[in-house]
Image (cartoon, rainbow, N blue to C red):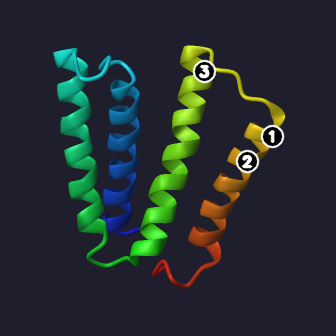
Amino acid sequence: MLSIHHLYLGLAILAEVVATTALARTEGFTRLGPTALSLGLYGIAFYLLALTLRVMPTGVVYAVWSGMGIVFIAAIAWIFHGEKLDLPAVLGLGLILAGVVIVNVFSNTVGH
């Protein structure tokens, strides 16, 4: 069963992904808009992550947060920015995604 803390984790992932996407547009923090967006969303992501860590184990939360962030950022870069992904990259991303699914579906550590 999903809890409010799972929602916090999902929103933390979303905030981190948008922040990282904006980070690529800051041009070394010289552009105010993308810089403010990136820093603000990173702050929100860490706040939501901290709320999640109240009840879920740090290792599991960080694995899910970072793993999903990696997969989503790679997908955004591929779809919207034309960055190429070769077969080893796609396979590696698939393994990361599989790991996140295994932890969430089969591990008792997550607190289902």
User: Of the residues under marks 3 and 1, which one precedes in the sequence?
Assistant: 3
Observer-nearest of 6 and 77: 77
Label 3: how many Cα within 10 Å (few below 14, some 14–19, many 20+) = few
Residue picked out by circle 3: 79
Residue displayed at 30% across by 22% down = 28
Residue that lies at the very extreme toward the bottom in this rendered image: 108
- SS state under label 3: helix
Say which amino acid is labelled 3: Ile
C-alpha gap between disc 3 and disc 1: 18 Å
- SS state under label 1: helix
C-alpha gap between disc 3 and disc 2: 17 Å
Residue 56 position within the rendered picture, expressed as x and y whole percent measured from the top left: 37, 76
- SS state under label 2: helix
Residue 60 position within the rendered picture, expressed as x and y whole percent measured from the top left: 48, 72
Drawn side of residue 41 relative to residue 102, left or right: left
Residue picked out by circle 1: 88
Drawn side of residue 18 relative to residue 91, left or right: left
46, above or below 110, in the image? above
Label 1: how many Cα within 10 Å (few below 14, some 14–19, many 20+) = few
Say which amino acid is labelled 1: Pro
Residue picked out by circle 2: 92
Drawn side of residue 80 relative to residue 38, left or right: right
Residue displayed at 73% across by 47% down = 92
Residue displayed at 41% across by 38% down = 17
Say which amino acid is labelled 2: Gly
The answer to whether residue 1 is visible is: no
The dot on residue 20 is: none
